[in-house]
Amino acid sequence: GTRCTTSALRSCLDRFRYSKMRKNNTFMGLYPERRWKDRVIINEYGTIYRSAAKLQAAYRARVGRRLAQEAKEKFYRNWVATHLQAMWRSKQARAFYELLRWEKARKDEAQMVLAGFAKIIAAMEILQGLREEAYLALANKCAIVVQAVYRGRCGRRRVARILDNLRIQRILEDRCARLLQRVYRGHVGKLRFKQMLKEHREWLAKCIKSASKLQRASLAFLRLVVIMLLAAYCSSMSTRLTPPPPSPPSPPPPPLPGRRAMAGPWP
């Protein structure tokens, strides 16, 4: 037959999967193995099993990748949603914080403005009170001045009327009546002046605590002074209007019955 070497047979051994190389005195070549058909079936089953396992693994891997992708997408969605919510909430919190700061600043400014207005109103009230007090003090002074002027004018008019009446009366009265009146009025005026002076001093001591009584006391004292001035003025006018004495001295008049004769001036 055809010559074939051992190396050539070994090189083509992989072409015959279910055979072995044999070499003896009668045979040298590739001999089928025992139960090679079963081996084919077993190998085909193994191939199918491996293919099925590989398909299952590929399917499971695909399903796992899909589930992993879904889980990853879900995780990323949750992560992105969480971060977006956190960013939105932080933004809202910062805006709310800024709003609270602005509201607090506005409240503080409003409190400062209200406190300023309250201080201004209190100062205006105090100023109004001081103005009213100053106005009342000025009004009292003006009233006192007006009263003094009016009373002085009335006193001057009264004094003028009294002076006119006294002047007319002095012209109509004679010398004796004027002398008697002068002496009597001088004596009565002295006594009255002493009495009134005493009463006036007592009255002044009592009326220190009352302004109205002090005004009445000053008015009474003014009347007394006016009377004294009138008395002094009357005496001076009577001396001026006295006619010159006649050249022959006249005998003194007889004394009135029931009265003592006046030998001289009244003591």
Image: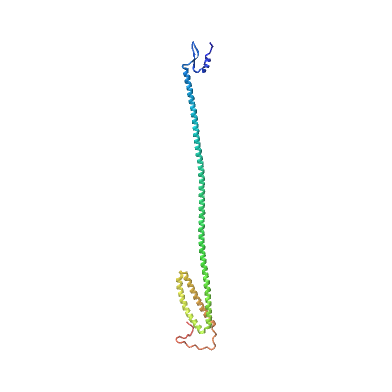
Counting labels gives: 0
Looking at the picture, how far across and down is residue 127, in whole percent? Answer: 52, 61
Decide: is 164 above or below 77.
below
Looking at the picture, how far across and down is residue 139, in whole percent? Answer: 52, 67
Task: Tell which of 18 and 11 is nearer to you.
Answer: 18
Looking at the picture, how far across and down is residue 94, in whole percent? Answer: 51, 44
Task: Tell which of 242 and 152 is nearer to you.
Answer: 152
Task: Tell which of 124 and 261 is nearer to you.
Answer: 124
Looking at the picture, how far across and down is residue 265, in whole percent? Answer: 49, 83
Decide: is 142 above or below 58.
below
Q: How is the image coloured?
A: rainbow
